[in-house]
Image (cartoon, coloured by chain):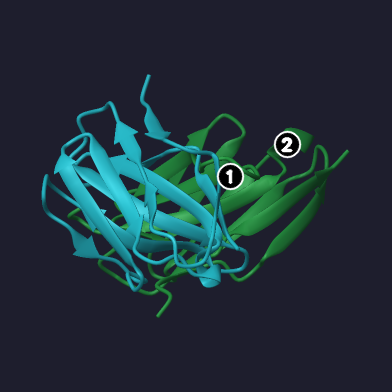
Amino acid sequence: DQQVKQNSPSLSVQEGRISILNCDYTNSMFDYFLWYKKYPAEGPTFLISISSIKDKNEDGRFTVFLNKSAKHLSLHIVPSQPGDSAVYFCAATDLTGNQFYFGTGTSLTVIP
Amino acid sequence: DVKVTQSSRYLVKRTGEKVFLECVQDMDHENMFWYRQDPGLGLRLIYFSYDVKMKEKGDIPEGYSVSREKKERFSLILESASTNQTSMYLCASSLETAGEKLFFGSGTQLSVL
């Protein structure tokens, strides 16, 4: 059963506007959440993370929000740039840090 | 800089062949992972290892085995390749500590004909 879900397979946004990517999880034991970005034919690269003790983490144009009661997290990219076009995966791990659970990914297209 | 190296970017094999995918990390990480990525299915965990000679099955271990003889190296073996194993294979590593991130290799695109 999928413990981390990304329900939007794709998203298109105009350059300069905000991109919002969403992720839901089911396991209340998840303690740490990450977003990865993946270009075709390359491995995923780490983008930003958030611990369950926080509800927001910001790094430049990227902000991750965590709503623990709703078991929901989102990634905001503002302003969006054409180079942000990629597949974005959210992931979660529990206190052991030994296993990472990934969503199915959202393909973001930023239109110039 | 952190590095996870996969031996091949592209690989073409025949059905029934034995296939070895090699992965090396230079970060002294305890944990190593093998995922496959397929369109619409995301990243699915095949096997992981949290120590030398230790291995744990992930979500889709059938048709695969792994070997970890040294801390830095984690090999994925397809005993008898089949067409449904055509996929992008991703190796990753992490520290054995909560709140640490995964570092991925560049991936191996395997085609089984």
The residue under the point 45% across, 46% down is: A56
Chain coloured cyan? B
Question: In this figure, which residue is indicated by the disc labeled 1?
Answer: A38
The residue under the point 33% across, 53% down is: B76
Question: What is the CA distance from the residue labelled 2 to the residue labelled 1?
Answer: 19 Å
Q: Position of residue A109 (x, y in %)?
A: 77, 49
Q: Is residue A98 visible?
A: no
Q: Colour of chain A?
A: green
Which disc, if any, is residue A79? 2
Q: Are discs 2 and 1 located on one and the same chain? A: yes
Q: How many marks?
A: 2
Q: Is residue B80 left or right of residue B107?
A: left
Q: Which residue is outermost to the bottom? A: A1
Chain identity of mark 2: A
Chain identity of mark 1: A
The amino acid beneath tag 2 is Pro
Q: Position of residue B54 (x, y in %)?
A: 12, 54
Picture layout, residue B47 above or below residue B68: below
The amino acid beneath tag 1 is Lys
